[in-house]
Structure formats: structure tokens, C-alpha cells
Amino acid sequence: MKNLTPIQLKTRQSYDTYKNFLVDYKPEQLLVLYDDINSIAQSVVCVRLTVEDVNAVYSYDKFPAGVDYVEKWLDFLNRFSNINKPLVETKAVAYMLYNDYKRFHLADLKVLFKLLMMGEYGSFYGSVDAQRILTAFASYARERDKQLLLLQQSLERFVDMQFEALYSDADARAYREAKEKGYDYMKIAKIRSEYRAAVDSDKQSKMESYKQLFYEKLKEKIKTS
């Protein structure tokens, strides 16, 4: 088996074939599976399976699973729209969408196609329009990039605030000890530096814990908003 990322390996272990994968992840089922995800912010708030992951796990020979999966969403849109002139070139459009947006989570497809079906990107007048679909994906991608940037900025601010609190506590401890023991300013600087170094000794571990805490708080906030 080719090298797989942890999330790809977990998917392969849960669903040994693409056919079995589709039982739970075909478009109709994904609308139910991700019933609680209805916005870009909810989709990107944590690491999820991407269209590229599907391609990596289930592609073989000349069968590109990622493209096929996107095409299944286009077929679903055709059926849902119930228009006399459905999108005909589904495979060609699926290739274009996969190449440009394979980074999208499957949850993104759920949110995006639901918006499409609700007419948020305009109505299909008489036919399922490839250009409207491509425009919708481009619009969604721009908003998604903005959300990801805001998310990263918020994460960095949160982590910085946690370390600022740790450094403030280290300084306070140093000054208390200095006052109790009557240290001179050189000794105060030394003990303060030692306490701050203790904070930095496992900084990476603390950082990962704070990131996890940030996402837990954010997911809870989004869920209740």
C-alpha cells in the first residue's frame, strides 16, 4: 500500500473499497452525515477528509477516485434540480473542479452544493449551467480562504495570550521570591530568566495543547451560535 497520511489510512481501514466508502459518503448520505455543518466556518474549523484524500486512497490505474467523487456531486445536482437540460459534460467539469479545489473538505462540498441547490449563487434557468457551477466554486473558495486566514490569525492571538499569561506568572513568581529573599537587581534578572526558561522548556508541547484548546472552544462556540 502506498504511503498514506493518518486520516487517509484511517479512511482505508474503515472502508476497504471505494464502493463501501460511498455507502456512507455519497452525496445524499453526506447531507445527513454533516447535518450540523452548514457554513464555511464550521467546515474548516478542524482537519477533515478532503477530496484529494479520497483520490489518494481509492484511485487505481486510470480511475481517478477524486474526480469520480466530484462527478457524483454533479450528478446529484442534476437529479435534485430536475431540469429538462441537465449538465451533460459532468466528467469534464469534475476534472476542472478537482484540479482547482481538491483541497476542499468533503464537508465543504456539502455546504457548497447545498448553497447551490438553495439558489444562493443564482438560479438555474432552464439548464444546469457549468459556468454558474464554476463561478460558485470560485466564490466559495475566496470566502474559504478569508475564513482560513481569520482562523489562523485568531489561533495565533490565542496562543500568544496564553504564553503572555505564563510569562507574567513567571515574572510574578520571580519578584515574590526576590522580595522574600532580598535579592539585588542582578539576582532578580537571573531568577526571572530561569522562570521564563522553564516556560520555554516544553513550549512546543504547550503550543499544541493551546491549539487544541482553541479549536475545542471555537467548535463549541460555532455549535451554539
Image: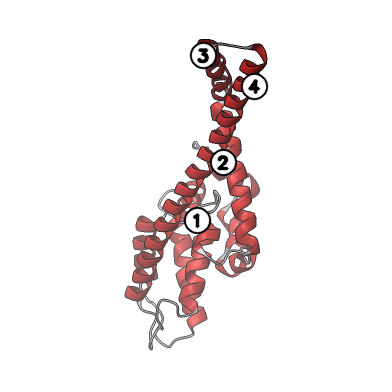
Q: Is mark 1 in CB contact (under 8 Å) with mark 3?
A: no
- At a point 59% along the width and 11% down the height, the residue shown is 183
Q: Is 45 in front, or is 12?
A: 45
Q: Is mark 1 in CB contact (under 8 Å) with mark 2?
A: no
Q: Is residue 92 visible?
A: yes
Query: How far across and how far down the image is residue 95, in percent?
Result: 36, 61
Real-space Cα separation, disc 1 to disc 4, in angstroms: 51 Å
- At a point 61% along the width and 16% down the height, the residue shown is 178
Amino acid tagged 2 = Lys
Q: Is residue 141 above or below residue 153?
A: below
Element under disc 1: loop
Element under disc 4: helix
Left or right: 110 as drawn, with respect to 96: right
Q: Is residue 110 above or below residue 131?
A: above
**Mark 1 nearby-residue class (10 Å; few <14, some 14–19, many ≥20):** many
Real-space Cα separation, disc 1 to disc 3, in angstroms: 55 Å
Q: Is residue 15 visible?
A: no
Circle on res. 211? 2
The residue labelled by disc 1 is 105
Real-space Cα separation, disc 3 to disc 2, in angstroms: 36 Å
The residue labelled by disc 4 is 176
The residue labelled by disc 3 is 185
**Mark 4 nearby-residue class (10 Å; few <14, some 14–19, many ≥20):** few
Number of numbered discs on residues: 4
Query: How far across and how far down the image is residue 137, in percent?
Result: 39, 66
Q: Nearer the viewer, mark 3 or mark 2?
A: 3
Q: Is mark 1 in CB contact (under 8 Å) with mark 4?
A: no
